[in-house]
Amino acid sequence: MKLSIINIKRLSSYILLSLLFTACTKNFVSKNTNPTGLTDEQANADFTLPAAFLQQAQRAIIPQDVGTYQLSENLTSDSYSGYMGAEAPFRSNSNNLTYDLVDGWNSSIWTHRYTQVMNPTYKIIALAAENPAFKDLDAFARIIRVSAMARVSEKIGPVIYSQYNKLNENNFISYDSQQDIYPAFFADLESAITTLKGLASSAVSPQMKKADLAYTDNNYQNWLRFANTLRLRLALRLVYVDPTLAKTQGEAALDPANGGLLSENNQNCYIVLSVAHPLNVIGYEWSDTRMGAPIESIMGGYSDPRIGKYFKPATDPVVAGQYKGIRSGIDIDSKARYDSYSQLVFFEENKMQVMVAAESWFLKAEAALRGWANAGDAKANYETGIDRSFEMYGLSASATAYKNDATSKPKPYIDPKSVTAGQNDITTGSPHLSTITIKWEDGDSNDRKLERIITQKWIALFPDGEEAWAEYRRTGYPLLFPVVVNYSAGAIPTIPGVRRIPIPLAEYNTNGGAAEAAAATLGGPDNGATRLRWDVENKSF
């Protein structure tokens, strides 16, 4: 289904009905006296309705719906990040992975988070404005919507955020440009952090307890840490285009007076799902995704013990017992060719990883490398990031030897089952095969230290392909393999590859003036080759 943001106001009754809610008026942008659609009695009775709004939004930060996940995540960022590869020749092999970008797939990136995140969080923020007792829910809603909508913006670019549900003089709903959206994200996070700091020593309210799908205790403190870590993540995104704002926001996140970052694994943010993990369905029931070639090369070259926690050995007789991935953007004749390559390890618990402590330590390592206040020591942060990641998988005993490995490097990738002989070979000496080692080297250049940090962060982020792809575009690390088959008709160069997803066609059809104005801020055509503002072409530390 293709939907524009204007159509969201027509969808509001459907969304509420699906949650057994009472719908608000059809015209969401009209002068409603109660924009939340909730009476005081409904909001205060047992907090079921406000909690359901926020539970819905949490489960859409990264979509739990399997069809939406496959289109918006698995067939874009999961593959573009190098984590996974599709085994099927979707659309006769002319699809996102071969750079024939499919609007019918990619529009789900946009529509799902507007209906499932922006709509319910909008209602909660409006509810809290009328009822100060819900200020904790206001903070929670702002954190959720930044977390979700940053992911949309970091795929598409301009998004509708500050003007959500507000018609302009031309009867369109205006976008925020990439230049404007980050200050809007930071403003929401600042508001949430201020509120949660004031509540940190208070007992958690019944409404927050009921709404929170990630934490069962220390809810305020953990979401405060999450908000600071998200602020630091977004600050570092801007280091090449707005270093002053990046440093200001990054140092605010690092300031211990603001509540700290995620630092221990018991603070990791996993959202409890109401269905099976979508990758279980895509990988097992549908058998549509397998290990990616870059992660085979990097983790295999490092003899990284986490590889067995992420993937299963291949069962194909040609590569049996090996961890074998599929390279994205290749000629695939049939699904059967790669069906026996490495599957993802089954997710035993139905929960979605949104942010983990290991990431915050790697963020701090980069911040320390850049000299930001309260960032600590780059080497210590880097090594702690590895420690936290190993702890997550019960591998702490192997961490010391891994951190001291000064020789292992990503290994060549060779696919013995490629349709065209040699098309998938990434051999020693290839510019697409990194030479970065694991052990921290004080004498290395800052660029090489950054590659080391980002490569290990990329491993630790798995399976969050959205964040991994964003960091790859921002920094150029880790080195990934280019596509072999490019069906973009020259619109997207094979190198450096796809950089963003276009604004959905439905937006041009129903919110045309605003979509055209937003596209004009991109600095290039609205296609997959135009870089987002923070994705600068010539990167130098």
Image (cartoon, rainbow, N blue to C red):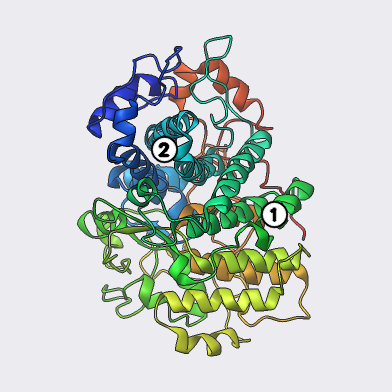
Is 514 located above or below residue 425 in the figure? above
What residue type is disc 1 on?
Ala
Q: Say which quadrant the N terminus sits in.
A: top left
Which residue is labeled 1 in the image?
252
Q: Say which quadrant the C terminus sits in.
A: bottom right
* Label 2, residues with CA under 10 Å away: few <14, some 14-19, many ≥20: many
Q: Which mark is residue 94?
A: none
Question: For numbered disc 1, what is the local secondary structure?
Answer: helix
What residue type is disc 2 on?
Val
Q: Residue at x 46, y 89 (%)?
A: 397
* Label 1, residues with CA under 10 Å away: few <14, some 14-19, many ≥20: many
| Residue 9 position within the rendered picture, expressed as x and y whole percent measured from the top left | 39, 20
| Residue 402 position within the rendered picture, expressed as x and y whole percent measured from the top left | 54, 85
Question: For numbered disc 2, what is the local secondary structure?
Answer: helix
Would residue 300 be seen by someone viewing this image from the given angle?
Answer: yes
| Residue 366 position within the rendered picture, expressed as x and y whole percent measured from the top left | 68, 65
Which residue is labeled 2 in the image?
117
Q: Nearer the viewer, residue 413 or 177?
A: 177
